Amino acid sequence: MWERTLDYLFNQRPAFERQGASGYKPGLDTSYALDKVYHEPHKRYRIIHIAGTNGKGSTAHLIASCLQQCGYRVGLFTSPHFVDFRERIRVNGKKISRNYVMQWVADYRKNPIEGYEPSFFELTSTMAFDYFAWRNVNVAVVETGLGGRLDSTNIVTPELSIITNIGLEHQQFLGNTLEEIASEKAGIIKHGHPVVIGNADGVVRDVFEREAKRLYADIRFAQDKPEVLSAKHVDGVLRLETRNYGNLDCELTGDYQVENCNTVLTAFNMLKRMKYRVKESALREGFARVVENTSLMGRWMKIGTKPLTVCDSAHNPPGFTQVMKQLKLERFDKLHMVLGFMADKNVAEMLDMLPKSTLMYFTQAQTPRSLKATDLQRIATGMGFQGEAYDDVTAALAAARQAAGESDLVYIGGSMYVLAELLKSLGYDDQ
């Protein structure tokens, strides 16, 4: 029954994550129609809505973790998942049950909406909103899927919107310039409701300021008066010196998380003004226990030692830039990179960030959207890299580990779907 349910969701419904452009379905008509059938469940609790090019997942998990520590019952909707579909929908860190998913899908299939063909993401977001209402959450932290203005989640009216940052991604859907992409992401800003922007400059900042002014929305840029004053690595955590919350130890250790942490703390400044119960001690616990509270995976995640083995979910040029900065901070003899990308990504731009001495292991995710390992090898070889192609990530990682010395570093990334297959193969099936 469970496998049949997943087959219906993934294979019978149009899904961008599996099919690419043919599975992308912009527009909100179907989402509104579904929402009406389920009696607008998202209106029964508060919502924090998060968009952005990179960092929105980490930001969502940090906020959810802190709100849990503040005593709220918190719904969390994110995408994609790594190992289990149920990772997408959680309440206080606990995944939605298989029985609920199976029953919900079965009920929908008995009474489909006439004249509409919901996509995978439209059904999934509606399921999440309905589940959160059933579980009587106080607040839901909702991450957009792709974009903002036409994203299936954008039927909500959040108490607070957050946009982490803007980079070039999904240009075929969102626009070819940073300004156009920012305009799409700005679509989550709602009339009279505040918005926090993590990092924005130039025309991107202008877009957000104009939209906030047009909608009479209070806007705060986290970069203007940073909450995080400094950060350093101490005993396996990222220790943050903050302006208003003392020292916070963050369980997410990538240096690129500093920007996300700054965004989160700026958001909590706003939530305090909105009369949310926010205590410094709760934020301290929320940062320190974010992985424990939410089961977040795939963010500068160390999965082995001797050689140090790290995986990360960066999958576009802005995210890869942050990974390169992180790699420069690590000490190792040789760098081994197990890489696989989706076919619609700017692969050459990301490869160009790597030193030519990098030892490469080209691989692919088992999804139609994936760039074939042999095609990735051909592109990289033309740029001066050397490496072998492997049909799956487990074979590529085995080869990298066999070749690496104890003082080397093995990195696995390029695609969240590559990471998903890796983590599943290693037994990271979060129960």
Image (cartoon, rainbow, N blue to C red):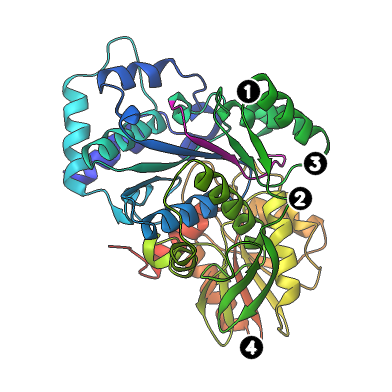
- Which of discs 4 and 3 lies nearer the camera? The answer is 3
Q: CA gap, disc 3 to disc 1? A: 21 Å
Question: Does residue 276 appear anywhere in the picture?
Answer: yes
Give me the residue at 61% from left, 70% from top.
411
Which residues fall within the magenta stretch?
Answer: 156-169
Q: In this view of the protein, which residue sits in the foreground, 76 or 9?
A: 76
Say which label, 1 or 4, has the lower sequence index: 1
Sort mark 3 into few (<14), some (14-19) or many (20+) by Cα contacts within 10 Å: few
Which element type, helix, strand or loop, lies under badge 2?
helix
Q: CA gap, disc 1 to disc 4? A: 58 Å
User: Relative to residue 318, is residue 69 drawn left or right?
Assistant: left
Give me the residue at 29% from left, 43% from top.
137
- Which of discs 1 and 4 lies nearer the camera? The answer is 1
Q: CA gap, disc 2 to disc 3? A: 26 Å
Q: Which residue is mark 2?
A: 348
Q: Do labels 4 and 3 touch, CB within 8 Å?
A: no
Q: In the image, what residue type sits under mark 3?
A: Asp
Name the quadrant of the N terminus.
top left
Compared to residue 112, the image places residue 228 above or below, namely below
Give me the residue at 17% from left, 31% from top.
106
Give me the residue at 16% from left, 28% from top.
107
Q: Which residue is mark 4?
A: 405
Which element type, helix, strand or loop, lies under badge 4?
loop
Question: Does residue 176 appear anywhere in the picture?
Answer: no
Q: In the image, what residue type sits under mark 4?
A: Gly
Say which label, 3 or 1, has the lower sequence index: 3
Q: Which residue is mark 1?
A: 216
Q: CA gap, disc 1 to disc 2? A: 42 Å
Q: Quadrant of residue 133?
A: top left
